[in-house]
Amino acid sequence: MPLVSVVMPVHNSAATLGASVRSVLAQTHTDVELLVTDDASTDGSMDLLRDFARQDERVRPQAAPEQGGAARARNLAMERARGEYVGFLDSDDMWLPEKLERQLAFAAEGDAPLTFTSYYKVDGDYTGEARDFTPNGRVVAARDRVTYKDMLVQDHIGALTAMYDRAALGTRLMPDMPKRQDYALWLSIMRDGHAARGLREPLAVYRAGRAGSLSSNKLSLVEHNWRLYREHEQLSVPRSTLALSGAVWHSLRKSRI
């Protein structure tokens, strides 16, 4: 059995998919399986995944029965997971070569079943490979430790860096929400009494808008955050309002990195 199961949802990502997959296969820790769910792509993404699978048996693609969104795609992958740990990477982001090796060692040092790391941001049109990445000054720094209370006012965990211990938590699926389903998963883990530990070293690369812009449109997530607080977390209106104001402020700060 592989030690780490990597979950990757794909929808029309042929332009960036290759670099993302290669960043997993080139990890210095090689005991992985890459579980990819193609969510009804029409751009040849599935053909590209089949090519990778023929070249490396660690790549295990699956076509979703119908287009269902990122949460369902991730859950289909997680249901096939065999690893002790589950990590997440989207099909337009990348891991630096030592990401898994360093994070696994970090996870073994503590008692938190959910870990994450700092990460770099690059422009959305970045075309380089992870192995050639030159560190820049655009770093989203991980906090050392976050609790459920901390997470209500900001999602401190970059999904492309998150990894949870399936041996400790079991297979934890994401709520079927159009957005913020990863945030909801972290909250559900921490609501059960678990904290998350952050590794300060930036070990992944996130494609975003240019520094100082709001092109990623974080404010568009206000509605989804509100629904998350009220429906998924069942917070009161005053508490949801307080959490939302904090989330908006922190998102504006992060967008300027």
Image (cartoon, grey):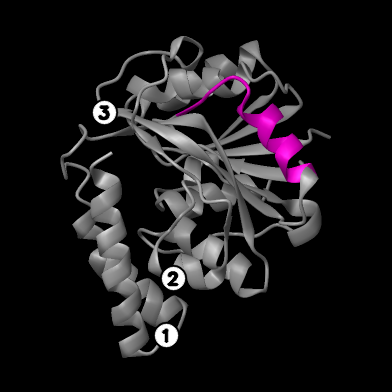
Q: Nearer the viewer, residue 33 or 247?
A: 247
Residue 247 appears in the picture as rendered: yes
Q: Which secondary structure lies at badge 2?
A: helix
Image: 141 above or below 33: below
Q: Earlier in the sequence, mark 3 or mark 1?
A: 3
Residue extending farthest right: 1
Asked if marks 2 and 1 touch (Cβ < 8 Å), the reply is yes
Percent position of residue 22, x then y: 53, 17
Three-letter code, disc 1: Leu
Q: Is residue 104 magenta?
A: yes
Label 2 and label 3: CA atoms lie apart by 28 Å
Q: Which secondary structure lies at badge 1?
A: loop
Label 2 crowd bin: few (<14), some (14–19), many (20+), radius 10 Å: many
Q: Is residue 124 left or right of residue 9?
A: left
Label 3 crowd bin: few (<14), some (14–19), many (20+), radius 10 Å: some
What numbered label is drawn on residue 165? none
Point 52% across, 51% down: residue: 143
Report the quarter where the N terminus lies.
top right
What numbered label is drawn on residue 235? 1
Query: What span is in magenta?
Result: 94-108
Label 2 and label 1: CA atoms lie apart by 10 Å
Point 29% across, 20% down: residue: 126
Label 3 and label 1: CA atoms lie apart by 35 Å
What numbered label is drawn on residue 124? 3
Q: Nearer the viewer, residue 65 or 212?
A: 212
Percent position of residue 201, x then y: 55, 33
Residue behind mark 2: 152
Three-letter code, disc 2: Leu
Q: Which secondary structure lies at badge 3?
A: loop
